[in-house]
Image (tube, rainbow, N blue to C red):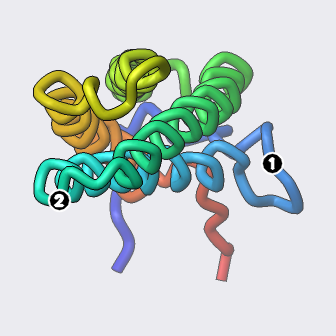
């Protein structure tokens, strides 16, 4: 089943320019902040349920590494957006970028809140930021998924 892509603004050169052995670095990196945002929310919920300080420390580490890996994904994604003309020609990649930057801001705020007193930071604001982070993960992921699955950005399609 072939689709008519004559009206798609992404038709043309949308191959990844930031890659390792043909695999886009941005796509590989985004899995880490996604998983770590989910883990931070899980740690917060377990802390709320058990009051075990272990989960407060877990939330500190997962939010911190989520921010670091999110920044790495943001750098590679921004480079991809700016270097590949076919990607930056439409509004959809910019929507994904804005949602991802909002996510990175929430992750950073969540980590910063926890730096000095992990347990006191969780309720209510840490938990709120963790839920907000999960919402932005969904929003940024939805926009990113549209770019990959609908417009085949970063996907190498064989001629067969």
| Residue positioned 63% across, 48% down in the render | 29
Residue beneath the point at 71% across and 43% down: 16
Q: Image height check: is 62 above or below 52?
A: above
Up-down relation of residue 160 to residue 125 (above or below): below
Which residue lies under the disc numbered 2? Answer: 50
Number of residue marks? 2
Quadrant that contains the C terminus: bottom right
Of badges 2 and 1, the one in the foreground is 2
Q: Residues within 10 Å of mark 1 (few under 14, many from 20)?
A: some
Question: Residue 119 location, x and y as percent?
Answer: 30, 34
- Residue at 79% in and 39% down: 18
Relative depth, front residue between 75 and 147: 75
Q: Secondary structure at mark 1?
A: strand
Q: Is residue 99 above or below residue 46?
A: above
Residue picked out by circle 1 = 19
Q: Nearer the viewer, residue 81 or 63?
A: 63
| Distance from the alpha carbon under mark 2 to that under mark 1 | 43 Å
- Depth check: 53 or 7 in front? 53
Q: Position of residue 137 (x, y in %)?
A: 31, 41
Dot 2 and dot 1 residues touching (CB under 8 Å) = no
Q: Position of residue 118 (x, y in %)?
A: 38, 31
């Amino acid at each position: 089943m072939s689709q008519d892509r004559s009206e798609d603004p992404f038709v043309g050169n949308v191959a990844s320019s930031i890659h390792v052995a043909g695999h886009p670095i941005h796509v590989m990196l985004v899995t880490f902040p996604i998983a770590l945002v989910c883990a931070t929310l899980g740690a917060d919920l377990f802390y709320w349920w058990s009051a075990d300080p272990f989960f407060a420390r877990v939330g500190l580490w997962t939010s911190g590494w989520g921010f670091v890996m999110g920044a790495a994904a943001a750098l590679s994604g921004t480079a991809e957006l700016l270097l590949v003309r076919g990607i930056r020609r439409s509004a959809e990649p910019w929507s994904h970028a804005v949602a991802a930057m909002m996510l990175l801001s929430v992750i950073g705020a969540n980590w910063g809140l926890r730096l000095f007193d992990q347990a006191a930071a969780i309720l209510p604001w840490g938990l709120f930021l963790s839920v907000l982070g999960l919402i932005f993960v969904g929003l940024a992921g939805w926009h990113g998924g549209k770019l990959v699955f609908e417009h085949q950005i970063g996907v190498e399609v064989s001629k067969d």
